[in-house]
Amino acid sequence: MNVNEARLHAQELDAQDALSSLRSHFDIPEGTLYFDGNSLGPLSFRSREVLHRTIEFEWRERLIRSWNEDWLEMPARVGNLIAPIIGAAPDTVICADNTSINLHKALMAAVALRSDRSEIVVDINNFPTDIYIAQSVANQFGMKLVAVTADEIIGAINANTAVVTATHVDYRSAQILDVEGITKAAHEHGALMVWDLAHTAGAVPFHAEALDVDFA
């Protein structure tokens, strides 16, 4: 397939894309083709409107009253909007902080529940920050970090494993890990499972409740 044929094929796929109309919801600079939404999504017109209301009304006018009028309940309310995207049960998702901070909190909570064990198993191809955080948690609890490839995770889980953590979709190759198999293996050995869904949510189906995922 030459360049012209590839362009025509891409245009045909665009014409068939059920989501193509959503592009009009975003304020993307003219002539820009943006493919880095996994890192920083483009500005939506709706986001601009909401931010304007937050600044001009909720913050400037209502001041501290906004906490009781709306802000305190917002993390749970937004969490319930996210829950169906990852197949989680209602009232089990909270919108808070960022991926790294939330991963640290989830790992700390999970390891505290298995503090009598000595190892944390991590996918060596995780996003680097995930590995740094897992190492930090392991150090805090005096545990050993066992870093292996995705194919080696199940074999690395044993009676010493406190927690297993991995990213469902590899941020470089788009490899999708075996959630069911890895989670099941962790539970069979009494370990807890923490999944990073940063590159999963809204991109590929996920069923957190059905898969009995502990933390995500």
Image: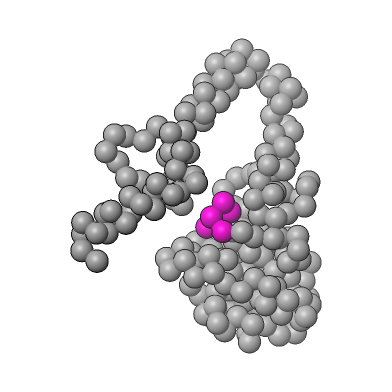
In the displayed structure image, the side of residue 60 where residue 118 appears, left or right? right
The x and y percentages for residue 87 are 70, 55
In the displayed structure image, the side of residue 99 where residue 72 appears, left or right? right
Rendered residue at 68%/42% (across/down): 81
Specify how the rendered protein is coloured. one colour
Near-viewer residue (57 or 14): 14
The x and y percentages for residue 46 are 52, 28
Rendered residue at 68%/73% (across/down): 180
* In the depicted structure, whether residue 197 falls above or below residue 187: above
Q: Is residue 152 magenta?
A: no
Is residue 194 at least partly visible in the picture?
A: yes
The x and y percentages for residue 68 are 75, 24
* In the depicted structure, whether residue 109 falls above or below residue 22: below
Rendered residue at 57%/48% (across/down): 98
The x and y percentages for residue 157 are 67, 82
Residue found at the very far top of the displayed protein: 61
Magenta portion: prevailing SS class: loop
Near-viewer residue (198 or 64): 198
Total tally of numbered discs in the picture: 0
Is residue 104 at least partly visible in the picture?
A: no
In the displayed structure image, the side of residue 144 where residue 31 appears, left or right? left
In the rendered image, the quadrant that contains the N terminus is: bottom left
Quarter-of-image position of residue 112: bottom right
Query: Magenta residues, as a range?
Result: 199-204
* In the depicted structure, whether residue 7 falls above or below residue 131: above
In the rendered image, the quadrant that contains the C terminus is: bottom right
In the displayed structure image, the side of residue 49 where residue 29 appears, left or right? left
Rendered residue at 57%/84% (across/down): 152
* In the depicted structure, whether residue 47 falls above or below residue 148: above
